[in-house]
Amino acid sequence: MSGAALLLLVVHMFFTAVVNTPDADLKYGVLPGAAADRYVRPYLVQDYKIFAPDPADTDRQLWVRAWVEDESGEKTRTEWVNATHIELSETYRKTLRKQLSIVGAERLMAAYSALNDTHKRVVGENHLDGEALYGVQDAMVAADDSEPAKVSEFIRASNYATSYGTQVAYAMWGDQGEIAGVQVRAVYDPVVRWVDRKDPDAERPPSRYTDLGWVPAMEWPAQDREAFSRTFRSWAEHAGVQPEDLEATAQTTEEN
C-alpha cells in the first residue's frame, strides 16, 4: 500500500471514530468534531433505521418562512412552506437518501433537543439585529456560558438550516422584494410504529418541532442563488405550491 493510500485510510478511520464519539464535549471540545461531521455527512453516513425490526417511524421535514420588504418599505410575513415536501416532489428524488432539507432538519432537531431550558428560551426569541452568524450565539453565551460545546453544535446546525432556508426564501419570494428575515423549523411528524402497524386502535404520536425566532438572511459566497431558485421553483411547480399561496398580511417583526 502506498503512503498516500495509507494516509487516506488513517484519516478516514480517525474521522469515523470522531463522528461516533458519544460525548459532545469531548467530540467538539477536544477532538475535531466539526471537521469530522463535514467529512462524513451526508454521503458517508449509514442509517440503520431503514431496516426492520425497527425501521424509521418519523417523517423529518424542514419548514421555512420569511419577512419580505418591498420597494415601499412595507414588510410582509409569508406563510410556512414545507421545503422537504417540495424537495421530494420529484419521484426520483424519493429514492435518494439524505436530501439537504432532511439533513438540515435532523441536525437542527438533535442540536435543539440537547439545549437546556435557558438556551431554548434564547433561541426562541427574535434576533434580527446584528449579524446572522453571531447574534444568536452571543445571546446564548451571555445567558449561560456553561455548555459551549452544545451551543457550538446548535449554531452549526442552525446556520446550515438558515442558509438553506434563505435560498428557499429567495427562490419563493425573492421577486417580491428583499428578504429581511428568515425563520426555520425542523418538524418531526411520527407515524404509527412498525410493531403497532396492525393495531386498528393505534394512533400517530403528536408531532414535535423546534421553536426558533427570526434571524437575518444568511448566504455563503459559494451559494448560487439563481441556480438554486431555478431548480427549487421547478420542484415547487411540480408539487403544486405557488408563492402567492403563501403570502400573508403585513405583520410586525416582534411577532413570532
Image (cartoon, rainbow, N blue to C red):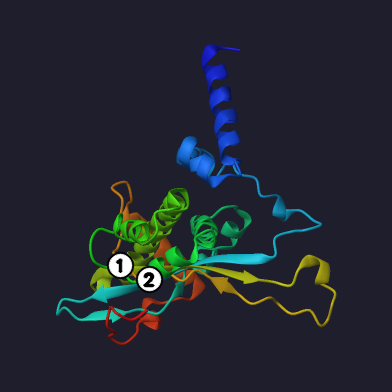
Quadrant in which the N terminus is drawn: top right
Quadrant in which the C terminus is drawn: bottom left
| Residue 60 image-quadrant placement | bottom right
Say whether marks 1 and 2 touch (CB < 8 Å). yes
Question: Where is residue 192 shown, x and y percent of the image?
Answer: 74, 72
**Who is closer to the viewer here, 116 or 123?**
116
Bin the neighbour count of mark 1 within 10 Å (Cα to Cα): few under 14, some 14-19, many 20 and up.
many
For the question of whether residue 73 can be seen, the reply is yes
**Who is closer to the viewer here, 194 or 70?**
194
Among all residues in the image, which is located at the extreme left? Answer: 72
Question: Where is residue 3 shown, x and y percent of the image?
Answer: 53, 12
Q: Amino acid at mark 2?
A: Gly
| Residue 74 image-quadrant placement | bottom left
Q: Mark 1 = which residue? A: 127
For the question of whether residue 42 can be seen, the reply is no
Identify the disc placed on residue 213: 2
Precedes in sequence: disc 1 or disc 2: 1
Bin the neighbour count of mark 2 within 10 Å (Cα to Cα): few under 14, some 14-19, many 20 and up.
many
Figure check: 163 above or below 122: above
Cα gap from disc 1 to disc 2, whole angstroms = 7 Å
Q: In what element is the residue under mark 2? A: loop
| Left or right: residue 238 compared with residue 174 | right
Q: Residue at x 35, y 78 (%)?
A: 78
Figure check: 81 above or below 231: below
Question: Where is residue 19 shown, x and y percent of the image?
Answer: 57, 40
Question: Where is residue 114 shown, x and y percent of the image?
Answer: 53, 58
| Left or right: residue 220 compared with residue 3 | left
Q: Residue at x 71, y 50 (%)?
A: 48
Q: In what element is the residue under mark 1? A: loop
